[in-house]
Amino acid sequence: MSTYVYGITHASHSLSKDVHGVGDPPEPVRVLRQGQLAAIVSDAPEELRPKRRDLLAHQRVLDAAGEDGVVLPIRFASVSPDDETVTTVLAERADHLLERLRVLEGKAEYNLKANHNEEAVLRLVVADNDEIRSLAEANRQAGGGSQEDKVRLGEMIAAALQTREAADAELLQRELGPAAEAVSAAPPSTGWLANLSFLIDRASAAQFLDAVDQLRRQQPHLELRVNGPLPPYSFVDDASEHAESAGEAFGTAADQTIA
């Protein structure tokens, strides 16, 4: 039976016996201990797909495990051939994994996604750009302006909005970064001007959230969505050279505690 791996923690970590994970029906979750380390695992379902049910189950296991202390989360669908392979990896990588646990003790990830309020940011770029404002007024007085002028105005506004997006993404990192132990920016994606993850000391979480609220008040053209506390997916390691060996052990997805 293959072993599904949720995360890695200290051997002293405890977990409620009624926690269940992925699968239909959900598989009971158990703890494999090796030296000072432990892996949170369950039997792997025969067919595993990224269905909402199993994605949520994976997250629930990590949330439950995190209540008793730091856990290095492993990405969804990480499967090892068997329990012995998991404990072998723990033994071989003990020094490195213990160091990562030490660094992340008492920390959580907060993800912030930002977008523009379209009407509010449009007013800002028009107010801040004399050329856009003049052309818009000229078009209005001309009953809408020529097709060429309309196209030119649209292009100018699009360029100004793109510039504003980049400036606001930098603003978010500049204003919120000092409250975090580390910041990780996701690759640009459609629909968000910024997708940032912040590593926050749990004792300072309230101050970080207050800083986000202050930005909302100061920059009403920004729509900010915060999700957390989360397992520190984006910060479990910055040593990508370890990914290959762990990937061999955890099959369908590389061991993300070290990727």
Image (cartoon, rainbow, N blue to C red):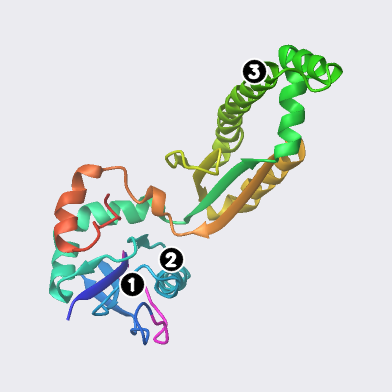
In depth, the one of 13 and 63 nearer the eye is: 63
In depth, the one of 223 and 69 nearer the eye is: 223
Amino acid of disc 1: Ser
x%, y% of residue 164? 62, 27
**Marking on residue 152:** 3
* Circle 2/circle 3 CB separation < 8 Å: no
**Marking on residue 79:** none
**Marking on residue 69:** 2
x%, y% of residue 75? 33, 60
In depth, the one of 49 and 236 nearer the eye is: 49
Helix, strand or loop: magenta stretch: loop
- Compared with 237, 160 (above or below) is above
Residue assigned mark 1: 12
Q: Which range of residues does the magenta coloring cover? A: 9-20
Q: Residue furthest right?
A: 141
Is 203 placed left or right of 79 in the picture? Answer: right
- Compared with 239, 161 (above or below) is above
**Badge 1 element:** loop
Q: Residue at image x 40%, y 54%?
A: 233
Amino acid of disc 2: Gly
